[in-house]
Image (spheres, grey):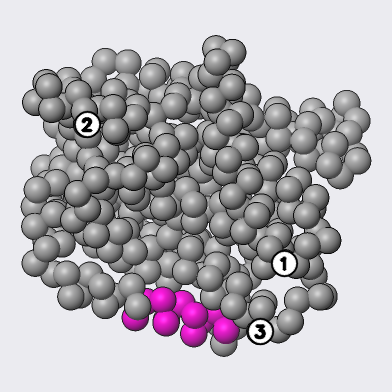
Amino acid sequence: MKKELVPEVIWLRCIACLAIVAIHCINLTFTNYEGSLASQTVTLLEVIKLGLLFGTPAFVFISEFLLAKSYSTYIPDKFLWKRVRYILIPYFTMAVVYAFYSLIRSDKLTPYALVVKILRNIVVADYIAYFIIVIFQFYILHIIFTKYFQSLSPKLFIPLCLAINLLYLGFFNFVPPLQIIPGAEYIWTRLYWVAFPGWLFYFSVAYQCGKNYSAFKEFLNLNIKWIILIPILTFLAIAFLKFTMILPETNSKRIDILFYALSMIFVIFYFASKTKRIPWVIDQISRYSFGIYLLHLMFVQTISKLFYELHPFINLPLTFIVSISLSIIFTYLLHKLKIGNYFVGKIGISFTRTNKESKQNDSWVETEIKV
């Protein structure tokens, strides 16, 4: 079955990818210039970072949206195997790469430390690609839901998923680590990110939006005033909770980000649907987004430190641009060596090329599902 290309997803994937890279550039700016940044600069960067926290949730939304749009009533043969080849294998491969990289960077590389770090990266997703494990849980959940629960009413399904999501994140946001649990500090600091209940609301909404794509676009058109207003109100709320130290952490696993992230996804989707063309650069970043996601942190950490002598407001955008560019170049070169699929997955099909072909064939196709 051929899958229709969704232009809005090209925009959303690109913007989400850029948001994630920008967040890591800001984090490195805080680290590299600690103690030398003016308080106003720190506040400004924190505000910008808050505004970018929709990036990771957007990738959850995109993944399930595309699945639901194509496979809302059935599951094709080799559904999971194709995703193991092009998504899960790179998770294992890059776990080894990041283990080497992190230990060399910290000057702690020993055979024992390497084995431990590789196992941590793979078993508890202790590196940037943890998100792949989140996505894979939703692949399995999509299969279960499609086979057994697709007749469930959205009026029950979405509120139920929201309640589970709120309870899960609320527990880890507001309850301190329970010391009776082994490894509680690590679980509360990072590991709880990996479990699917922390992302379930995005999954439920994306499923309904993908399954009812035309109705979703009509909903956006009919409610555009609210679609634009809600991100503003929710952003003010998360900024208030951040700077009053009620929720001091700045990450996408905050309970209040659920509503802000989804509203931002809807805004981007609406405005993307009104564009008449997709610029080449947007198309390319979207195509290479998986490779950028997997590779960029190594470049961000290296480039940011390399340009340390520069003013932070020069270092940050320079690191951002160079890291994205190098990630694309390395992804391209890996595929030229025919090993790219096993490190950075597949490169997405070109929207521009597909769009031209559609004028001849009268159909748009997307040959793969990308996260």
Label 3 sits on a secondary structure element that is: helix
Q: Which residue is mark 2?
A: 355
Dominant secondary structure of the magenta stretch? helix
Return the x and y of residue 139 as percentages of the image width and height.
36, 34
What segment is highlighted magenta in the picture?
233-243
Q: Which residue is mark 1?
A: 312
Label 1 sits on a secondary structure element that is: helix
| Residue type beneath disc 2 | Asn
Return the x and y of residue 171 as percentages of the image width and height.
50, 67
Return the x and y of residue 91 as percentages of the image width and height.
57, 30
Res 314 quadrant in image: bottom right
Question: Is residue 77 at least partly visible in the picture?
Answer: yes
The residues bearing labels 1 and 2 have C-alpha atoms spaced at a distance of 40 Å
In the image, taking residue 217 as reference, residue 129 lies left or right, namely right
Mark 1 closeness class: few <14, some 14–19, many ≥20 residues within 10 Å: many
Label 2 sits on a secondary structure element that is: helix
The residues bearing labels 3 and 2 have C-alpha atoms spaced at a distance of 46 Å
Q: Which residue is mark 3?
A: 40
Up-down: is 230 above or below 109?
below
Return the x and y of residue 301 as percentages of the image width and height.
73, 49
Q: Pick whichever, 143 or 171, lies toward us.
A: 143
The residue sitting at 77% across, 35% down in the picture is 101
Was residue 336 drawn as part of the magenta stretch in this picture? no
Q: Quadrant of the C terminus?
A: top left
Q: Nearer the viewer, mark 3 or mark 2?
A: 2
